[in-house]
Image (cartoon, rainbow, N blue to C red):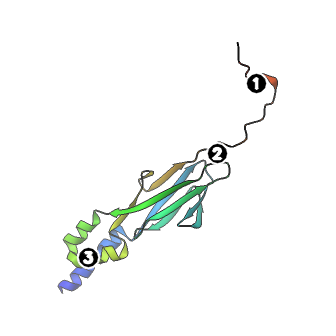
């Protein structure tokens, strides 16, 4: 009977916290192509579900802007303590095995929204001069 209760508690922790983490990915500017772990996955803004079981590398690319690479790293979730209290070692082992023991984090991630701002490339072509009035002439 106690084994059944432990498995139920472990399953409960997985259901409450889950082994995936939904993250909204936004960028400035919009319309940025994002590869996740080397494969194209989305164009911003979008929501994507990430496995909590391992780290992820996201690369943001848009023509005319510097690429940005962001790493989502897993860290121990507070749900592990709840699993330990409710189901003991079996619940904790299950949470680790499924990934439910972790949260993904990054300095740009807040409230499950990952926000990045791309920088225009420094070698981009300056805007053309439309008239001589647009030209700034230094005064002696």
Image height check: is 130 above or below 112? above
Q: Residue at 25% of width from left, 71% of height from top?
A: 83
Q: Quadrant of residue 43?
A: bottom right
Q: Mark 2 or 3 closer to N-term? A: 3
Query: Mark 1 = which residue?
Result: 135
Residue 78 shown left or right of residue 52 in the figure:
left
Q: Which mark is residue 84?
A: none
Residue 9 in sight here:
no
Q: Nearer the viewer, mark 2 or mark 3?
A: 2
Pointer 1: residues within 10 angstroms few (<14), some, or many (20+)?
few
Name the spot of residue 47 as percent of width and height, x first.
52, 61
Element marked by disc 2: loop
Q: Which mark is residue 91?
A: 3
Element marked by disc 1: loop
Image height check: is 124 above or below 55? above
From the image, which quarter does the C terminus lie in? top right
Q: Mark 3 or 1 closer to N-term? A: 3
Query: Mark 2 = which residue?
Result: 121
């Amino acid at each position: 009977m106690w084994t059944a209760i432990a498995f139920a508690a472990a399953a409960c922790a997985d259901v409450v916290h889950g082994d995936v983490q939904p993250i909204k990915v936004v960028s400035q500017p919009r319309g940025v192509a994002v590869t996740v772990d080397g494969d194209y996955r989305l164009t911003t803004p979008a929501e994507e579900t990430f496995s909590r079981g391992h780290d992820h590398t996201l690369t943001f690319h848009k023509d005319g802007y510097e690429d940005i690479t962001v790493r989502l790293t897993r860290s121990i979730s507070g749900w592990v303590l709840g699993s330990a209290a409710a189901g003991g070692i079996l619940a904790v082992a299950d949470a680790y095995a499924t990934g439910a023991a972790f949260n993904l984090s990054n300095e740009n991630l807040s409230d499950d929204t990952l926000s990045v701002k791309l920088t225009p490339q420094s070698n981009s072509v300056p805007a053309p001069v439309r008239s001589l009035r647009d030209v700034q002439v230094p005064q002696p």
